[in-house]
Image (cartoon, rainbow, N blue to C red):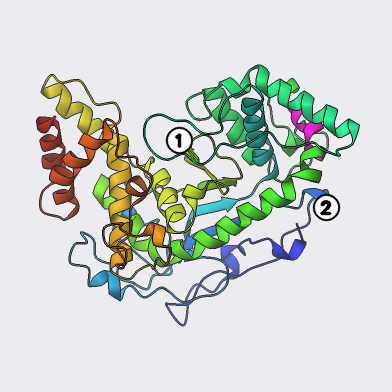
Amino acid sequence: MAQDSALVLEPLNNFPRTLPDSRTAVCRILPQPPSTQAEFDDKMTLWVMIPSNLRIRLHFIPIVALICLAAVGWPNSSAAARNPYSKIQPPAQQTSGQDSPLPVFEFHSGFWVNLHHFLYLQARLSQGNPSSTDNGRGQAPPDEHLASLLDFPAADIQAWHDAVAFYAKDLARRDLLLNGDMQNINDRLADMETCPDLDGKTSPSCKSGLRPELIETLQRAAPVYRAHWWPEQDRADREWIAQVSPLVRRMGVELSGQLADIYQRTWPSNRLRVDVVWYGGPFGAYTSLSPTHVTISSHDPRNRGVYGFEVLFHESSHALSGSVSEAIAREFRARDKPIPRELWHALLFYTTGEMVRRDVLYGAASTTDPQERDPQDPDSSTYQTYATRFGLYSGSWVRFRGLLDLYWLPYLDGRISFDTAIARLAAAM
């Protein structure tokens, strides 16, 4: 990547503590420091931050407020303020130079993480497994095909075949999210983003601690991937980030606050790392916790436009979902009923989709894609939520949708309490 295209933040102590205009962005674009090897100076890191003079309710102070693409003004939230259905009013600005800004999202297009997921995909395809999972819910994207090696040098073909075979032997059979070892690999490769190797030969900080045979496989495959696939996949990742970032800037403040308030949990105070990858698993995105780490596909057509924004916040909501899971378990046990396995997940999709739909309806965002509109009213600007658009409300989720409409929606409208909503859901099933 060209040195002048990286996006980083200047250290906060270089900014004035008192700003002349509370709407001025507290960030600017700086050149990326040179890497130890020029060919690995290819990461894309984008921080989304809240400035020091913006204070929100204490239980969700660290909320996304600004995309540091350039110095821009704060979005106009007057349309959201007119929304009669919104539980949470837009936060008021207060001048305070005491609190440091807290970053929320940190977007990356990292070489090693992308290589790992691409090898995982190729290994699954080599074994006849599909690139997506048909679980009876939702429209999966068309299956991918094995990457062509036509006209590749013989050495590249051999190195790539060896890497795919290594993944096919074991790793490709594991779940990217549910397998603890796969989570660790994803987290460690994310940490190694700027490293030219994974065994620490160039720098002690690049010692990944992964299994030697995995390190050897990735390092042998790296030159092949970089020469033939990485430029295009990195471009797709960057385009996704550039597409979703303005939506986060316009809608992120209010939506983060709404979700924290709805789930009665504090929005995470640490950075939420988002690794944008060409292939993000069979469902297009997944999130591991402790720490929260979102991995999302730039290639999956379900993740484009406003839907990419909705998926981002749905995945982030997993960090807040403990209160919902605990409350559902408590209410069902009290009634001596089996706990519905997927109810909490359907509730998360429903909640994020409903909040985004309201933001679109009341002007905080716009949608021009006809596929994002309500099919029963194609001339309207009503947003068709992700779960509706891609058919998640099928199978057991058909009943979930009806119950959420009856008993969870009144809570989102502010008409009943959280505990009452969960209790009514449990009683009705």
Residue under label 1: 289
Which residue occupies 38% across, 58% down?
372
Q: Position of residue 202 (x, y in %)?
A: 83, 38
Q: What secondary structure characterizes most of the magenta part?
A: helix
| Of residues 95 and 408, the one drawn nearer to the viewer in this rendering | 408
Whether residue 353 is visible, yes or no, is: yes
Q: Is residue 37 above or below residue 212?
A: below
Q: Residue furthest top?
A: 169
Residue under label 2: 38
Q: Position of residue 316 (x, y in %)?
A: 41, 46
| 267 displayed left or right of 128 | left
Specify the quadrant of the image occupied by residue 186: top right
| Of residues 135 and 310, the one drawn nearer to the viewer in this rendering | 135
Whether residue 43 is visible, yes or no, is: no
Q: Is residue 220 magenta?
A: yes
Which residue occupies 21% across, 31% down?
328
| Of residues 139 and 176, the one drawn nearer to the viewer in this rendering | 139
- Which quarter of the rendering shows the N terminus? bottom right
Query: For the residue labelled by badge 1, is the local secondary structure a helix, a strand or a loop?
Result: loop
Tally of numbered discs: 2
> Bounds of the magenta span?
215-223
Amino acid type of disc 1? Leu
Q: Is residue 37 magenta?
A: no
Which one is earlier in the sequence, the residue at label 1 or at label 2? 2
Q: Position of residue 289 (x, y in %)?
A: 45, 35
Q: Position of residue 216 (x, y in %)?
A: 78, 26
Which residue occupies 58% across, 65% down?
13
Q: Is residue 271 above or below residue 214?
A: below
Amino acid type of disc 2? Ala
